[in-house]
Amino acid sequence: MATKTATKKATKKATKKVTKKSEAARIRIEQFRSPIGFDRGQREVLRGLGLRRIRHVVERPDSPAVRGMVAKIPHLVRVLED
């Protein structure tokens, strides 16, 4: 019984550390062009980022995965600097 409680506490502590890290490194991404006329895969990348319409801005964690998605569609989105 004691090990389950200790494991839960350790998991909660690890979760808190991860959220603090992800809050510090965030990027804002804006869609400025329509995906009409481009490959379906590019539309799917937009949706994967959570972008739905022109001038829509989302905030995502600054991770290699998100940076890779942005790199696939630089003609449709821009990274906003604060």
Image (cartoon, rainbow, N blue to C red):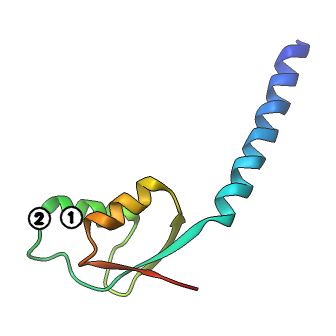
Q: Residue furthest right?
A: 2
Please tell me in which quadrant of the rendered image residue 38 appears.
bottom left
Q: Is residue 64 above or below residue 76?
A: above
Element marked by disc 2: loop
19 or 65: which is nearer to us? 65
Image x and y of residue 14, in percent = 76, 39
Give the residue at x 11% y 64%: 39
Mark 1 — residue?
Answer: 42
Give the residue at x 70% y 48%: 18
Give the residue at x 80% y 28%: 8
Q: Looking at the rendered structure, which numbered label has been put on residue 39?
A: 2
User: Within 10 angstroms of label 2, few (less than 14), some, or many (20 or more) residues?
Assistant: few
Image x and y of residue 70, in percent = 35, 67
Q: Is residue 2 above or below residue 49?
A: above
Residue type indicated by callout 1: Gln
3D distance between C-alphas at marks 1 and 2: 5 Å
Q: Is residue 68 above or below residue 28?
A: above
76 or 1: which is nearer to us? 76
Q: Residue furthest top?
A: 1
In the image, taking residue 45 as reference, residue 57 lies left or right, namely right
Residue type indicated by callout 2: Asp
Give the residue at x 85% y 32%: 9
Image x and y of residue 10, in percent = 82, 31
